[in-house]
């Protein structure tokens, strides 16, 4: 648990298309077995410390002919950003994925005099 005492709290959010493999017969659509896609998300401005990050699908377009197998996570979280990671496996066919993310953490405030000598 993160506890904030007398600090500014920042909330950053975004919506990212991670991939669209249907039209180009990409690996997520035509492949089988373990597959993974990563994308680096950068916070602007940066947080004071690594925030709490929540990632969820906001659009998924998946073939109905096989089981839906997805694993979505935020990895390598720093004050500057994080990696959103999508994984699937076996015979799951994924045409496209869009992800929504939310980051909450300690933020800089103008009264902090950040960068002042």
Image: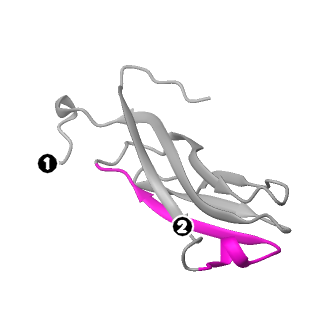
Q: Is residue 99 visible?
A: yes
Q: Position of residue 38 (x, y in %)?
A: 57, 66
Q: Position of residue 11 (x, y in %)?
A: 39, 33
Q: Is residue 76 visible?
A: no
Q: Residue at x 45, y 54 (%)?
A: 16
Q: Position of residue 82 (x, y in %)?
A: 50, 56
Q: Is residue 42 left or right of residue 28?
A: left
Give the image's coloring scheme. Answer: one colour
Q: How many tags in the picture?
A: 2
Q: Residue at x 61, y 78 (%)?
A: 26
- Between the C-alphas of marks 2 and 1, the distance is 47 Å
Q: Is residue 111 magenta?
A: no
Location of mark 1 (residue): 117
Which of the pair 62/44 is nearer the observer?
62
Res 91 → quadrant: bottom right
The reply to whether callout 2 and callout 1 are in contact (CB within 8 Å) is: no
Region of the chain picked out in magenta, as a range: 25-44
Q: Is residue 39 magenta?
A: yes
Q: Is residue 70 left or right of residue 110?
A: right
* Front of the two marks 2 and 1: 2
- Residue 115 higher or lower than 22, as above or below: above
- Residue 76 higher or lower than 3, as above or below: below
Q: Residue at x 86, y 68 (%)?
A: 90
Location of mark 2 (residue): 20
Q: Earlier in the sequence, mark 2 or mark 1?
A: 2
Quadrant in which the N terminus appears: top right
């Amino acid at each position: 648990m993160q506890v904030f005492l007398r600090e500014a709290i920042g909330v950053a959010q975004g919506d990212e298309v991670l991939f669209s493999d249907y039209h180009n017969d990409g690996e997520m659509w035509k492949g089988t077995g373990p597959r993974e896609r990563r994308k680096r998300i950068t916070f602007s401005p940066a947080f004071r410390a690594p925030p709490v990050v929540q990632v969820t699908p906001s659009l998924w377009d998946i073939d109905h002919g096989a089981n839906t197998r997805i694993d979505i996570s935020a990895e390598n979280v720093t004050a500057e950003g994080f990696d959103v990671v999508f994984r699937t496996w076996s015979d799951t066919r994924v045409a496209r994925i869009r992800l929504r993310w939310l980051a909450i953490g300690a933020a800089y405030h103008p009264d902090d005099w950040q960068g002042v000598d």
